[in-house]
Amino acid sequence: MEIKGKRILTVSSPASAGKTDAAVTYAVDMAAKGHKVIIAQPTKTCIDEWFAKAKERASSRRKKPVPVYRFDSSTCEEGQVITTIMGHLKCPGEEGQVLFLTQQALLRLPYFHRPEHWHVIVDEIPAPDVMFCKHLPHNHEIITSAITWQDFSADNVKVAATDNAKLRRLADGDDAVDAEFRTIARAILDPDYDVFAIRENIERTVAGDTENGKYPLYLFGVLKPSAFTKFASAIIMGAHFEESLLHHLWAVQGAVFEPHSQLNKALRFQQHQNGHRVSIHYLAEDSWSKKLGGKKVTVDGTEISNTILGLTKAAELVGDQPFLYQVNKDVEDAAEEFFAQLPATALPHKPHGMNKFSDFHNVVVVASFLPTPMQCRFLSNFGITPDQIRDAICHQAVYQAVMRCSLRDLHCDVPVRVVVTDVSVAQWLADQFPGCTMVQAPGVQLAKKGKGHRIRLHADNSARVRAYRKRQDEQMGEVELANILPGIQNGKISPLRLANNIYSPIVTSKHDHLPLADTSASDFMDLSILERELFAGTLFRHIRDTNTTRHLFLKSMGDMIEWLRHCHGRTCQDKHSNFLISPTLFNPTLGDKSRGRENAVITWGIWLDIDDGDMPYHAFAKMFAGKAMVVYNTASSTNDTRYRVFMPTTGYMMAETYDSICKQIIKVVQSNGYCSPRQRKRGSAKPCHGIDPTKLSVENMMYLPCKPMDGSDGFFRVYDGDPINPTLWVQNNILPVDMPPPVLIAVPDELPMPEDHSHAAAYFEKLVAAIGDVVLGRNCGLYRASLHGFAMASAGLLDTWMVETRLEQAAFAAGLEKREIGPTIGSGRYNSRNQIGRYLGWAARGNAAA
């Protein structure tokens, strides 16, 4: 039962499958064997129901009854719940027992005495995040004076306490103003939470640049797996656990989830069997939001909101039958007044686990559960896509409301009518109830938003997490490799260190410029100079110049900034008479070119060309407040929306790391409301950022600063701060993970991996044979065979022509259309670069054996 590392046991099933019932029985049995068990439930209402059942089961045991306790406001003195729990945990006795607590109380405990002696069952998935949002244009120092923040990613900073005494006062004091900061202060002090801020948001707040309070201060607390892994075992139960925010956020942190075999076997079902009873009616084609719900429409000469219109249509559908309804808090009073003469019962906002509404056969949910744009931005920085946020928050909330009705009763055959806001919610619900019907409610006309349809990039969430971690490993390998190259070349670091860093195709395809056999010889250049001086770029006379020997070496980042300032004082006849700079050190002996991407060895600093856009340079600088950067005018313009940006880095990078950082910068800019030049051409009404997408690769060049040709002084701005840390930005990459579209379902890894050179051909034939497996999915089988086949070919285990031929033959034999085969094989071939490293070792073992 012991959890090692960050392993969490899970019970994921539909609502009403009997999770809590099985857990209570399991807890009582565990306690009878001498174990101490905590059951943490979401509300006191849930404890009322299940504590009584646990007491009954514990007292009915033939042998010694099992003690069952509960600690909440109904059993403890006012304000003494935490103190009472702490006292019991300090002296719990030697016997086995079951404790019922609320999740909030469990997570608020400042200290847990001997957690390794306790097993925890968390009934319903706890909220993994807390959000602080207050307009504080003048009083932000109440909280900001007690904290500090450090760089974490391209968009986030990590918050830490500097004044613990003040934070404790905010967390536990009885002052009404302090109470506004209570939740976030507790999260900052709690070692089981990480607290973050959006860099631009907190820097603008502290600088007083909130536009008279228009922009509130946001702080986000994220619960860490350590909150539960400290126990002897931790079981988290909930519907659709794999789609929850907790799963998404913890998987990124490296948590490992394992289904609890005993409890999962005790469930009544794994998929709803009563879908034939369900009819789902939706009000709108477009995604519902509070803004859309608040819009006014005229019906029979009366102006009402879309929400009231939706409730009107829902009431017409239900007729005179009793029904449950759920709305947002801001329309509760209006809904209560509207339904005053109808048999309507309001659901609580968190109805998880409640069984007292199971006599109802109609449910109306006209509410928006969408998080704020800033919260969506924060979650997206952890690689969570908008669709995943919608599934985890909106769809799960609607599902929990719907599952309070008679659908919980497996023996009931009465039809159930469900009314929801929009087609995406209805479709998600329909997927949970096979055999249900789904139709649009008649007579509801709402404006069309024109939003595109959903595209799934990953077979499932596990595939997304694997892709995220794989990308991190590859790019971290690049960062480390880029900064140990000088040591390898100079003989100070063993070439074996390089072999341990073969994570990406960039590395594996370019190791020939490193003298691995003889570290004293080189046909390129002596990279040991990088240990003494800073490589700042390669200079070129014109855009077609192929001479890559004009290297710029300086002593420090400060020297680079001063050198750029000196360049800005020069006058050029026209921009073509100016020098260009590339941030990359090129090896002209690689490939067919001398300064192409394949020639890139290392890169330092980020350069951006911003032109023909609507984003002033001071707006860009605010987005990356606290980051060092230089902004200067172009030769042909002094407009503050046409400029160049240089952002230094703490270390050298390789090509893919440079690409990733540039893309993260663009994501931050677009999160601030700007569109790309391509989106502008397609008709976007947003302001355009103007970042030239063709200048975001390591081989591109930028004109050095100079005075404008109109004779003015132009502008040259230096923003003080820290350089970009490529290691941090790669570790905490805010980009979504891209996977090839052909993979639409989970691909099991059942086939054995080859152990040496002689087994590679046989293994490849097994992969080819699986292409026709309709269970696996032909596209998936073809993609996997391509992925591993071309990787083995690149490692010298197979012939490339043979791999391509066999793949095409097998694909046609499996019945795939010609238009599918080429892109699928191409995707596998492209992504096979990331698999080469694993096969190089097998190739080496095979050659050694031969």
Image (tube, rainbow, N blue to C red):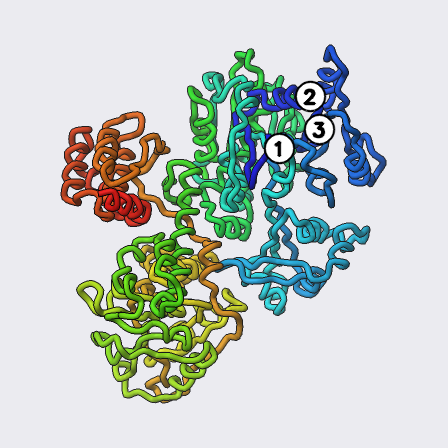
Look at discs 1 and 2 and give the one toward the viewer.
2
Q: Which residue is mark 1?
A: 233
Q: Residue at x 50, y 65 (%)?
A: 623
Asked if disc 1 and disc 3 are in contact, CB closer than 8 Å, the reply is: no
Identify the mark nearer the N-term, 1 or 2: 2
The residue nearer to you, when weighing 338 against 793, is 793
Q: In the picture, residue 733 is in which quadrant? A: bottom left
Q: Which residue is mark 2?
A: 33
How many residues crowd mark 2 within 10 Å: few (<14), some (14–19), many (20+)? few
How many residues crowd mark 1 within 10 Å: few (<14), some (14–19), many (20+)? many
Q: Position of residue 385 (x, y in %)?
A: 45, 45
Q: Which mark is residue 537?
A: none
Location of the N terminus by quadrant is top right
Question: Amino acid type of disc 1?
Answer: Ser
The residue nearer to you, when weighing 612 against 245, is 245
Q: Looking at the picture, does residue 260 appear above or below residue 659?
A: above
Question: Amino acid type of disc 2?
Answer: Lys
Q: In the picture, residue 517 is in which quadrant? A: bottom left
Identify the mark nearer the N-term, 1 or 3: 3
Q: CA distance from mark 1 to mark 3?
A: 11 Å
Q: Position of residue 466 (x, y in %)?
A: 42, 42
Question: Amino acid type of disc 3?
Answer: Lys
- Asked whether residue 330 is in view, the answer is yes
How many residues crowd mark 3 within 10 Å: few (<14), some (14–19), many (20+)? many
Q: Which residue is mark 3?
A: 36
Q: Position of residue 104 (x, y in %)?
A: 69, 39
Label 2 SS: loop
Q: In the picture, residue 81 is in which quadrant? A: top right
Side of 751 relative to 260 (left or right)? left
